[in-house]
């Protein structure tokens, strides 16, 4: 496994980052011990970087996977908090749940413009205090938009940017794939540590996984790439690709056919809460129930958290 330094932070991370969203309740909803075993498999293969978020509800999985692990582990988390007190509660909750004295990277979740960041500046000020006190090592933003990357690049207080980028441009807001690549290069020129997300388009690109991963691995500004994994086979596949090793044909056959989709149950009441929650504009109401545009859906599963009837899930 290759390792790189995230910008000017001094934090060394594996090029493959374990994206913890997929094992948790918003997606696969694995039992904690089963999800932890998948994460542990990645650690044993040399992955030292785990990406999560307060919203994902996966802290128990990460704690169980890392309990007793002697090697270095870098954890990045995120919060939607926009006030000083809200961000303090988010960070303190992460520290308790993960049983850690500090979180390596703590990000503002889904910051899509300079205006959004300014509206959350009270939370940034708390993170700056926490960084000074050693409760976090680096701070920054995650974003799906070209403007979000460019805005964050110009904020001296930020160390890290976590942008969406993939070969098909799925989920990129406010520009094309090429626009996002240019924004990432610009952010790197400001010294920001950058690690990518949604390299497989939330699962849409699994049939093209080897091509899609080769694309992000060819982006020199990305120190690491977070990839969601829910099975040991997916871990083994991604480790092989990121380590430059040949992928056994049997392993590719198992992983390559696992295309994901957003499923909406027949009992959907059409309340519209999921439509309001969807940041990608992929959900809409028709015939009295919710429907999804698969070309826009990022397969994040965030919509499922607001469904009062529990009828939305990524499968």
Image: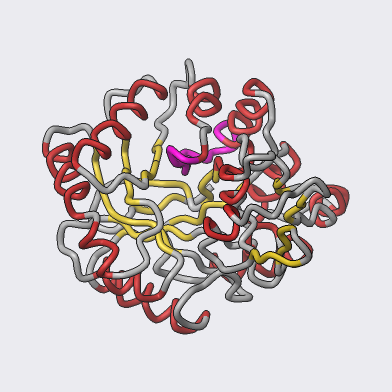
Image spot of residue 101 (x, y percent): 27, 23
Q: Is residue 260 above or below residue 144?
A: above
Image spot of residue 177 (x, y percent): 52, 79
Q: Is residue 118 above or below residue 56?
A: below
- Residue at 49 percent of width and 65 percent of height: 164
Is 132 situated left or right of 28 in this image? left
Residue 205, can we see it?
no
Q: Is residue 258 above or below residue 96?
A: below
- Residue at 61 percent of width and 61 percent of height: 298
Q: Is residue 49 magenta?
A: yes
Q: Nearer the viewer, residue 55 or 65?
A: 55
Q: Nearer the viewer, residue 29 or 287?
A: 287
- Residue at 65 percent of width and 50 percent of height: 238
- Residue at 79 percent of width and 51 percent of height: 255
Q: Is residue 44 magenta?
A: yes
Image spot of residue 170 (x, y percent): 60, 71
Is 52 situated left or right of 79 in this image? right
Is 298 situated left or right of 66 in this image? right
Image spot of residue 212 (x, y percent): 65, 68
Residues in magenta? 43-55
Q: Nearer the viewer, residue 109 or 230?
A: 109
- Residue placed farthest to the top in the image? 68
Q: Quadrant of residue 39?
A: top right
Residue 100, can we see it?
yes
């Amino acid at each position: 496994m290759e390792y790189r330094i995230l910008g000017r932070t001094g934090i060394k991370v594996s090029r493959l980052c374990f994206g913890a969203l997929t094992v948790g309740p918003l997606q696969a909803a694995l039992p904690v011990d089963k999800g932890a075993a998948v994460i542990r498999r990645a650690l044993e293969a040399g992955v030292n970087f785990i990406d999560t978020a307060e919203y994902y509800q996966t802290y128990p999985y990460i704690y169980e996977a890392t309990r007793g692990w002697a090697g270095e582990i870098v954890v990045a988390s995120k919060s939607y908090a926009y006030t000083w007190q809200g961000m303090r509660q988010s960070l303190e909750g992460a520290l308790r749940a993960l049983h850690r004295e500090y979180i390596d990277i703590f990000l503002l979740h889904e910051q899509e413009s300079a205006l959004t960041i300014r509206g959350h500046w009270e939370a940034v000020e708390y993170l700056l205090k926490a960084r000074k006190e050693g409760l976090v090592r680096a701070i920054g933003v995650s974003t799906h938009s070209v403007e979000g990357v460019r805005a964050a690049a110009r904020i001296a207080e930020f160390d890290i940017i976590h942008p969406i980028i993939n070969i098909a441009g799925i989920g990129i807001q406010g520009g094309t794939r090429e626009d996002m690549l240019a924004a990432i290069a610009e952010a790197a020129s400001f010294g920001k540590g950058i690690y990518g997300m949604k390299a497989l388009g939330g699962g849409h690109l699994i049939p093209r996984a080897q091509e899609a991963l080769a694309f992000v691995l060819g982006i020199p500004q990305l120190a690491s790439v977070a990839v969601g994994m829910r099975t040991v086979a997916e871990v083994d596949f991604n480790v092989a690709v990121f380590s430059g090793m040949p992928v056994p044909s049997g392993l590719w056959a198992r992983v390559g056919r696992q295309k994901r989709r957003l499923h909406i149950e027949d009992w959907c009441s059409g309340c519209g809460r999921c439509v309001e929650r969807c940041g990608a504009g992929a959900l809409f109401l028709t015939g009295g129930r919710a429907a999804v545009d698969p070309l826009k859906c990022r397969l994040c599963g965030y919509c499922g958290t607001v469904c009062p009837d529990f009828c939305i899930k990524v499968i």
